[in-house]
């Protein structure tokens, strides 16, 4: 996507949002992108469509954007989206759903065709309302932070948080969309991507695999194939090219 950028959310929303972002397509052909799993979900407004919600991805999600379109987004932290939306995210895995079908009360405030500046301001107001009504589940938030550490063992997570495995899985399904093991896989994959983007063209894949928390390069290869449809080498080659995340 041309002219894509991200910025930090206001401090008042930082407990639920990881970033705000925007993208504008040019006047030429449609823009093809590939969105990869990141453990987050997004509330988006598109100038020719209105508001829609991107559920949790468990694999690559191709996207085609028409020309001359503005796209605005608010990205929720892992574990924050389900409570804010008021719908278990397990129901929205790998889906892009118009907000009218989920929360028509909010969708009416972000119709297609309004000025992008108005849409950006309203997107913030809608997110603030959502987070006030449904703050992040503190247990899931704590679990997500632990899973971001490659030393964390999923089998020990429930005990560390003082709940049963069954309760932990239920609360993750609501707040994240899938269980702790899948979130751990996604967060590990994002660590690898971050390292690849930091050193495009100079990637020692075996070393990056260990640094990201994989057992070895073969483990990395299996996981990148499952989560992106690409080999680690192809991801590394694309690190400086079209946006994949």
Image (cartoon, helix red, strand yellow):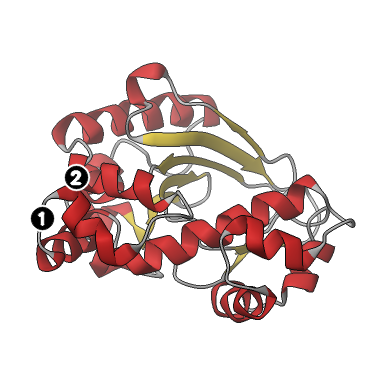
Rendered view: 32 above or below 6: below
Q: Give the camera-side residue of 153 and 113.
A: 153
Q: Which mark is residue 163?
A: 1
Q: Which mark is residue 237?
A: none
Q: For the residues carrying marks 2 and 1, which lies nearer the camera in this image?
A: 1
Q: In the displayed image of the protein, which residue is found farthest to the top? A: 11
Q: Position of residue 177 (x, y in %)?
A: 29, 63
Q: Give the camera-side residue of 85 and 168.
A: 168
Q: Position of residue 198 (x, y in %)?
A: 76, 45
Label pair 2/1, CB-CB below 8 angstroms: yes
Which element carries disc 2, helix, strand or loop?
A: helix
- Residue at point 83% right, 59% down? 203
- Residue at point 39% right, 32% down? 123
Q: Earlier in the sequence, mark 2 or mark 1?
A: 2
Q: Position of residue 103 (x, y in %)?
A: 21, 49
Q: Can the viewer see residue 137 in this picture?
A: no
- Within 10 Å of disc 2 (Cα), the crowding (few <14, some 14-19, many 20+) is some
Q: Which mark is residue 139?
A: 2
Q: Position of residue 214 (x, y in %)?
A: 58, 67
| In-image side of 35 versus 167 (left or right) | right
Q: Give the camera-side residue of 213 and 140.
A: 213
């Amino acid at each position: 996507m041309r002219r894509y950028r991200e910025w930090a959310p206001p401090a008042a929303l930082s407990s639920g949002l990881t970033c705000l972002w925007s993208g504008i397509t040019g006047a030429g052909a449609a823009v093809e992108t590939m969105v990869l799993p990141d453990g987050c979900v997004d509330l988006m407004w598109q100038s020719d469509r209105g508001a829609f919600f991107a559920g949790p991805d468990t694999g690559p999600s191709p996207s085609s954007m028409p020309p001359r379109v503005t796209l605005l987004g608010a990205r929720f932290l892992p574990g924050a989206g389900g409570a804010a939306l008021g719908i278990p995210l397990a129901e929205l895995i790998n889906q892009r759903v118009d907000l009218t079908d989920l929360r028509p009360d909010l969708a009416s405030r972000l119709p297609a065709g309004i000025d992008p500046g108005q849409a950006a301001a309203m997107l913030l107001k809608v997110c603030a309302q959502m987070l006030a009504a449904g703050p992040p589940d503190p247990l899931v938030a704590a679990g997500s932070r632990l899973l971001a550490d490659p030393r964390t063992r999923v089998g020990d997570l429930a005990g560390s948080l003082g709940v049963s495995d069954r309760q932990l899985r239920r609360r993750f399904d609501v707040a994240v969309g899938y269980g702790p093991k899948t979130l751990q896989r996604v967060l590990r994959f994002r660590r690898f991507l971050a390292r690849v983007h930091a050193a495009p063209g100079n990637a020692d894949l075996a070393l990056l695999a260990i640094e990201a928390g994989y057992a070895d390069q073969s483990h990395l290869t299996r996981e990148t194939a499952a989560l992106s449809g690409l080999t680690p080498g192809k991801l590394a080659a694309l690190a400086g090219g079209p946006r994949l995340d």
